[in-house]
Structure formats: structure tokens, C-alpha cells
């Protein structure tokens, strides 16, 4: 259990900065197409914003942003998004994760690669973020309540 | 001779970083300092691979979306960067599990010093 | 410092510096992993990725195309590694055994 900090400057500054950090992390994930970035990098920055809230506001007050019991199930949800893209290509008659077969949904050959990569990066970002936050929560207190 | 020195000085600096990490793992007695030495070692290895992928007078591997013939000596080698993203994730996982084990050791034996631990375990 | 770790560290440093002096110069465009064709005659993988990754996936960033299109299976294995680390941390530090 981390207790809340006594310093009002710390509380106000971290509450002010968190939406901007999360917006930058979403920019890094989605712009993995056109510039440096991608799933792993954006997931790390998103996890850093939630750990900042946990350290400055304490564990009880920052439960409203990201519950402690949500950690591992969200991680498996990200892996499920990744797997379902692979199974979707198998449904249309190709091999596992063969993006050419997504063209049956109405895209041309190059567009199906575009959307396949985008969905994979979003799944990777969600999985990495929730696992790093859940490792931090397990290291700082117990899950069944003190 | 000058060319040999200028072309290899980066590898010597990375070797120094690796030796510093190995010093932390071998000589220090506190278990937490050994885990931090492992982290420095992994950072040295990742730096070695990423730095060996550079080319002279070349730029980052982001091409403009044209269909002209791409001259492959203008862009640096992208393959070690990809493999090192995997290595960074492995480094984070190993550090997390090592710190969890350290918490359990401290809860049972009430110390993190190596010699006191070896005496208490016998 | 005692004598045994000092000898081991010096030996390790000398071995690293000696073995990296056999590597090619930094940034040499004619070294074995930067050129176009390997000594047998087949094409080097990095050269193929730079030339064809932009057209294959309509995306300028070559590193993301390699991670998510050509080598997507390795990224799947990577996610399984980090999920396993998360589960292991939870199992070690539970309270009611």
C-alpha cells in the first residue's frame, strides 16, 4: 500500500500532467506506421503515466483510474486481439497471420497489410501496458488487502 | 592505424560497460546491487548490437512512400533494431521476477546480505 | 577487492577487447551484413527488407513492418514472454498461499 503524498505541489502537478502523457503515448502507438514508434514503446509510456499516479496519489485514490484487479485480464485481452487477427486470416482460407487473405473484406492487397499491422500494434500496446502496471502493483502491496 | 582506432573505439567503450556490470554482479555483497549489475550488463549488450548496425553517411530506416528504386546504402540496417526490441522486453521481465524473489527472501530471513544469508541457511 | 574476482574481470576485459578487434570497422558499407549478396550468391536479408518493405505494406517505417508483417510470429512469442513474467510475479507474492 502506498500512502498519498503530503505535498500539494506534487499532487497537483501529477494530476495535471497525466492526460498529456497518455495522449502522447496514444500518438506513439498509432504513428508507428509513419515514424519511429510502435506497440512496445507506446505501451511503456502508457504504463509510466499510471505508475506516476500510483506513486503520487497513493493506491486507494488512483484505483478509479486503473483497478488493481484489472491488471492480468487486460493483458490477456491484448493477446486475444493479436490471436484473433491470425485466426481471421485462417477463416478466409489462408495460413496463420497471412495478411493477403484479408482482401476479401473489401481492401486491395496493400490496404489489408496496413490494417493488419495497425490492429496488431494496438493489441501489443494494451498487453504491455497492463502487464507492467500489474508487476508494479504486485511488488508494492498485496492484492487481497492488507 | 588511425582507421583501426576510429573504427573500433566504440567496441572498447561497450566492453568497459560490460565489465562494470560484471563487477557489480561478482564483487558486491548486497543482493539488490547484484540485480542492478545484471541490468547494466543487459544494457551494454543491447547498445553493442544497435551501434553495430550503423553505416557511414546513412540515415534512419524510414523511406518516403514513393515507388522509385531505393538505394540500400542510404539507410542503416534495420534488423538489429528489431531484435533488440525483443531483448529490452526480456530485460524488463527478468528484472521484475528477480525483484519479486528478493521481496520473498527479505520476508523470510529479514536480511539481504549474502554472507549472513548463507550462514542462516545452514 | 580480493584477488580472484580481479583476475576474472581482467581476463574477461582482455578477452572482449581482443575478440572485438577482429570485427570490421564501424559503418563499413562493404562488411558482410551490409552488402547486397552474400559470398555464396544469395541475397542478404537486411538488403531485401530495405528494398521491398515499403511497397509490401504501404508504410514508411521499416522496423514496424519487419516486427508486425515479416516476423509477426516472433512478436506473438514476445507477448507470451511478458505475460508469463506477469503471472509469475502474481503467483510468488500471493498472501493466502
Image (cartoon, coloured by chain):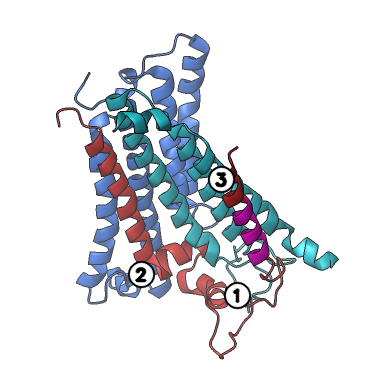
Chain colours: A blue, B cyan, C red
Q: Is residue C15 magenta?
A: yes
Disc 1 crowd rating (10 Å Cα; few below 14, some 14-19, many 20+) is some
Magenta span: chief secondary structure: helix
- Residue B89, image x, y percentages: 42, 50
> Do marks 1 and 2 share a chain?
no
Q: Chain of mark 3?
A: C
Q: Secondary structure at mark 3?
A: helix
Q: Secondary structure at mark 1?
A: loop
- Residue found at x 33% / y 42%: A131
Q: Chain of mark 1?
A: C
- Residue found at x 67% / y 64%: C18
- Indicate which disc residue B99 carries: none
The residue that label 1 is drawn on is C33
Q: Is residue A28 magenta?
A: no
- Dots 1 and 3: beta carbons under 8 Å? no
Q: Does B107 sit above or below residue B76?
A: above
* Residue A8 located left or right of residue B57: left
Amino acid at each position: 500500500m502506498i500512502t498519498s503524498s503530503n505535498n500539494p505541489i506534487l499532487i497537483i502537478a501529477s494530476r495535471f500532467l497525466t492526460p498529456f502523457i497518455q495522449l502522447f503515448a496514444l500518438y506513439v502507438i498509432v504513428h508507428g506506421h509513419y515514424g519511429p514508434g510502435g506497440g512496445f514503446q507506446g505501451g511503456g509510456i502508457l504504463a509510466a503515466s499510471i505508475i506516476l499516479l500510483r506513486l503520487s496519489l497513493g493506491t486507494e485514490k488512483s484505483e478509479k483510474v486503473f483497478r488493481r484487479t484489472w491488471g492480468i485480464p487486460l493483458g490477456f485481452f491484448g493477446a486475444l486481439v493479436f490471436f484473433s487477427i491470425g485466426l481471421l486470416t485462417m477463416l478466409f482460407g489462408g495460413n496463420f497471420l497471412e495478411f493477403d487473405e484479408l482482401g476479401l473484406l473489401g481492401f486491395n492487397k496493400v490496404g489489408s497489410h496496413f490494417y493488419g499491422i495497425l490492429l496488431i500494434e494496438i493489441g501489443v500496446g494494451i498487453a504491455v501496458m497492463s502487464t507492467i502496471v500489474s508487476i508494479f502493483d504486485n511488488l508494492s502491496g498485496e492484492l487481497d488487502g492488507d | 592505424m588511425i582507421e583501426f582506432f576510429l573504427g573500433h573505439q566504440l567496441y572498447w567503450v561497450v566492453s568497459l560497460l560490460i565489465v562494470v556490470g560484471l563487477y557489480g554482479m561478482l564483487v558486491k555483497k548486497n543482493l539488490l546491487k547484484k540485480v542492478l549489475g545484471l541490468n547494466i550488463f543487459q544494457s551494454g549488450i543491447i547498445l553493442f548490437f544497435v551501434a553495430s548496425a550503423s553505416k557511414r553517411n546513412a540515415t534512419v530506416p524510414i523511406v518516403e512512400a514513393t515507388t522509385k528504386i531505393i538505394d540500400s546504402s542510404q539507410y542503416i540496417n534495420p534488423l538489429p533494431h528489431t531484435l533488440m526490441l525483443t531483448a529490452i522486453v526480456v530485460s524488463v521481465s527478468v528484472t521484475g521476477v528477480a525483484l519479486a524473489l528478493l521481496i520473498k527472501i527479505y520476508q523470510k530471513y529479514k536480511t539481504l546480505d549474502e554472507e549472513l544469508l548463507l550462514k542462516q541457511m545452514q | 577487492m580480493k584477488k580472484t574476482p580481479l583476475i576474472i574481470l581482467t581476463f574477461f576485459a582482455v578477452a572482449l577487447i581482443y575478440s572485438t578487434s577482429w570485427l570490421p570497422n564501424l559503418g563499413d558499407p562493404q562488411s558482410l551484413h551490409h552488402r547486397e549478396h552474400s559470398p555464396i550468391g544469395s541475397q542478404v536479408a537486411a538488403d531485401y527488407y530495405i528494398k521491398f518493405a515499403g511497397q509490401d505494406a504501404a508504410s514508411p517505417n521499416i522496423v514496424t513492418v519487419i516486427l508486425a508483417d515479416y516476423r509477426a510470429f516472433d512478436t506473438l512469442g514476445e507477448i507470451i514472454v511478458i505475460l508469463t513474467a506477469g503471472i509469475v510475479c502474481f503467483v510468488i507474492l500471493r498472501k493466502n498461499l
